[in-house]
């Protein structure tokens, strides 16, 4: 039996263990919390902080000496840790430099623009006073993004030069290496998330696209739909952009995911990472509409070969996720979630918050209470299930006009 190691054992990753075990893999989990949500499902567990690369490599060496480690992966932002372990142990995965470049939005932006990869115009900024000179070549509105981040966290939209000047006076001129940002044009259009996999020889395999939309005026994911409604030609264009974006950063082994937007000038890549997309895409959406979806990933990280025979065959189903609406404030009561589970067998609740937790005013997807995940034979049926489920949910909060300090 082959053993695969998943770094990060949060609640959203439980599904990965279930799927891997259904394929016959032994699953090792490491997490900084010994009481993490994946602890009880793991065949073996290590309480290690996912940022502690030395401890991770030490654990990996021990497992490798005892012939109980064949591959490593993550569904979290800990991609550089995976790269470090795979490189140190000779496992299939991206190199350290490539993984770091993909995580650093400033470095990847610079390289993509130099290599003519389709991406929004922009630049890295870390506190220089001549920001207006840099911004002369950009069209407003523009976005200011943390160099390292996820879920839309920390993104700020600037609509004109006056707002940019004010932002720079208050924040920008005080930035340093640790707090540097990327400033780029705010391009408009529908959003698409895309996955791909490189085998040990560097051959690229398309690995799924989902259609994605956001709450009005926010960087909070509202819903995703699978399979994509892009036609075959547009799918090919997006897959090629993902492949080229990855190769430009030196990525040519293992999984890669991209966040993209379709504009009047075609697809533009916003960012990529050396992993598959997070749980809603890769653990729920695609496995719902494609038979044996994750076999390709597990095959590559353990053998280097892509399992073409058993992956990416559509089963004719549709997947829809939707954010669970809730007012900001301290949660004092939650009702209706069990009613959904009892009424619909093809809908799941991904819950991030509980009674006693605070709901912030949503600025990123990390602020969400949770999501509903529905699978049905038609997109209309999936949407209807979502709407009826939302009507059953009640989340009561107090101090809704103010959030936790």
Image: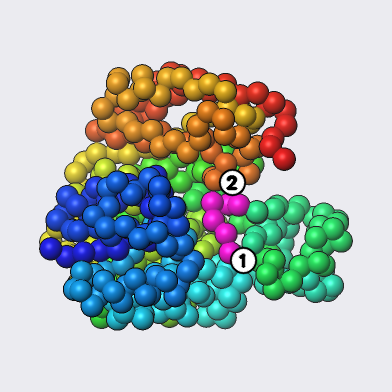
| Residue 139 place in picture, x, y as percent | 72, 62
Disc with the residue nearer the chain's start (1 vs 2) = 1
Numbered mark located on residue 223 in the image: none
Instruction: Report the magenta stretch's main SS.
Output: loop
Q: What residue is rendered at 50% in x and 55% in y?
A: 262
Q: What residue is rendered at 55% in x and 78% in y?
A: 111
| Residue 310 place in picture, x, y as percent | 14, 58
Q: Dot 1 lies on which element? A: loop
Q: What residue is rendered at 27% in x and 58% in y?
A: 44
| Residue 390 place in picture, x, y as percent | 45, 24
Determine if residue 244 is in view: no
Real-space Cα distance between discs 1 and 2? 16 Å
Q: What residue is rendered at 27% in x and 48% in y?
A: 41
The chosen color scheme is rainbow
Q: Nearer the viewer, residue 310 or 11?
A: 11
Q: Quadrant of the N terminus?
A: bottom left
Q: Dot 2 lies on which element? A: loop
Q: Is residue 393 left or right of residue 328?
A: left
As drawn, 171 above or below 350: below
**Dot 2, how many residues are within 10 Å of its Cα: few (below 14), some (14-19), or many (20+)?**
many
Q: Is residue 152 inside the magenta stretch? A: yes
Q: Is residue 14 inside the magenta stretch? A: no
As drawn, 64 above or below 208: below
**Dot 1, how many residues are within 10 Å of its Cα: few (below 14), some (14-19), or many (20+)?**
many
Determine if residue 350 is in view: yes
Region rendered in magenta:
147-153
Residue denoted by label 2: 364
Residue denoted by label 1: 147
Count of numbered circles in the view: 2
Q: Is residue 313 left or right of residue 109?
A: left
As drawn, 148 above or below 208: below
């Amino acid at each position: 039996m082959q053993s695969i190691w998943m770094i990060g054992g949060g609640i959203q990753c439980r599904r990965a263990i279930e799927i891997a075990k259904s394929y016959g893999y032994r699953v090792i989990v490491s997490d900084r919390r010994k009481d993490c949500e994946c602890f009880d499902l793991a065949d073996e567990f290590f309480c290690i902080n996912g940022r502690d690369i030395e401890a991770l490599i030490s654990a990996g060496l021990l497992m490798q000496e005892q012939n109980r480690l064949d591959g490593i992966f993550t569904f979290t932002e800990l991609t550089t840790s995976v790269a470090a372990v795979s490189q140190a142990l000779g496992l299939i995965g991206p190199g350290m430099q490539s993984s770091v470049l993909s995580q650093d939005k400033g470095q990847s932006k610079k390289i993509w623009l130099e290599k003519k990869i389709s991406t929004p115009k922009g630049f890295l900024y870390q506190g220089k006073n001549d920001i207006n000179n840099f911004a002369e070549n950009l069209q407003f509105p523009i976005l200011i993004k943390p160099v390292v981040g996820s879920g839309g966290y920390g993104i700020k939209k600037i609509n004109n030069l006056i707002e940019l000047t004010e932002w720079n006076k208050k924040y920008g001129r005080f930035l340093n290496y640790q707090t540097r940002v990327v400033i780029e044009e705010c391009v408009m259009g529908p959003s698409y998330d895309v996955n791909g996999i490189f085998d040990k020889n560097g051959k690229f395999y398309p690995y799924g696209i989902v259609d994605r939309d956001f709450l009005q005026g926010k960087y909070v994911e509202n819903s995703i739909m699978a399979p994509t409604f892009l036609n075959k030609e547009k799918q090919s264009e997006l897959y090629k952009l993902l492949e080229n974006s990855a190769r430009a950063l030196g990525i040519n082994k293992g999984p890669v995911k991209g966040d993209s937007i379709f504009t009047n000038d075609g697809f533009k890549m916003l960012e990529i990472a050396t992993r598959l997309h997070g749980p809603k895409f890769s653990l729920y959406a695609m496995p719902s509409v494609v038979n044996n979806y994750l076999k390709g990933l597990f095959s590559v990280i353990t053998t280097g070969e892509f399992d073409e025979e058993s992956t990416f065959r559509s089963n004719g189903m549709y997947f829809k996720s939707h954010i669970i609406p809730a007012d900001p404030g301290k949660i004092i009561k939650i009702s209706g979630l069990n009613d959904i589970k009892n009424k619909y067998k093809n809908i799941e609740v991904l819950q991030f918050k509980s009674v006693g937790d605070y709901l912030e005013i949503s600025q990123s997807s990390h602020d969400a209470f949770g999501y509903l995940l529905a699978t049905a034979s038609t997109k209309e049926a999936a949407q209807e299930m979502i709407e009826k489920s939302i009507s059953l949910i009640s989340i009561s909060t107090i101090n809704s006009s103010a959030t936790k300090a």
